[in-house]
Amino acid sequence: MRPRSWLFIALGACVGLAFGIGGFTFTYAKGYSYLTHDPAACANCHVAYKREGAMKISDHHVRSPLLNINRACQTCHKWSEEELKGRVETLQARNQKLRGTAMDALVDLIHELKARKDTGATDAELAEARGFQRKAQFYLDFVEAENSSGFHAPQEAARILGDSINFSRLGQSALRNPQPVQQTAAPKDP
């Protein structure tokens, strides 16, 4: 083999190694996910930033990314501002509608609990419905506290709000079809 052919073999091995490592890293890090329209692909923080040389510098204004789509979204997502804003607004409108339904269901349950209490229902008779009311309230509060109006994980927000609605429904059902309260005898002293 000629000395020059070793140079080409070594160069080819280096190039192959570089492409192999780069390909593995791209696949392992799921770099291809940034080429999709799937909002679950977002892996970076969407705080607006600017570049100064090789450094990313946050503008330190914690606010809606929609106020600066170019810096907050388009650094990774290469669609137009109109498309990105439209997608966010659609997801948030769906979340807002479901959130309203969950809140209405919870308020209806609370009104029914109050009405039953006013007609003389005992705490024991209301205990099951109150348990469902607490769960419905907790799930609704969780989505409210998350503060993205459902955008960060729309499917999960919808699931949690659906569970809240179901707990409210179960509470109303417990009020309408009460189960008899079982009296337990006090333990006897030996």
Image (spheres, rainbow, N blue to C red):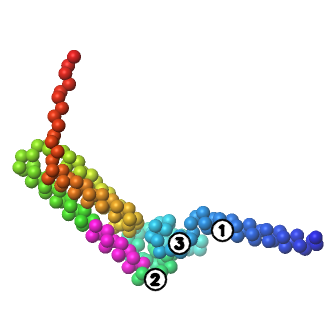
Label placed on residue 23: 1
Provide the major secondary structure of the magenta segment. helix
* 168 up-or-down from 61: above or below: above
- Residue positioned 75% across, 71% down in the render: 15
Label located before the other in sequence (3 or 2): 3
Q: Of discs 1 and 2, which sits in the foreground?
A: 1
Amino acid at pointer 1: Gly
Q: Are discs 3 and 1 less than 8 Å apart at CB?
A: no
Proximity of marks 3 and 2: CB atoms separated by less than 8 Å: no
- In the picture, the disc for residue 34 is 3
In the image, what residue type sits under mark 2? Ser
Residue at mark 3 to residue at mark 1: CA–CA distance = 15 Å
Residue under label 2? 80
The N terminus is located in which quarter?
bottom right
Query: Which residue sits at x=16%, y=34%?
Result: 183
The picture places residue 16, in percent across and down from the top left corner, at 75, 69
Does the stretch in magenta take in 97? Answer: yes
Q: Is residue 7 left or right of residue 47?
A: right
Q: Which element carries disc 3, helix, strand or loop?
A: helix
- Which portion, as a residue range, is magenta? 84-98
Contact between marks 1 and 2 (CB within 8 A): the answer is no
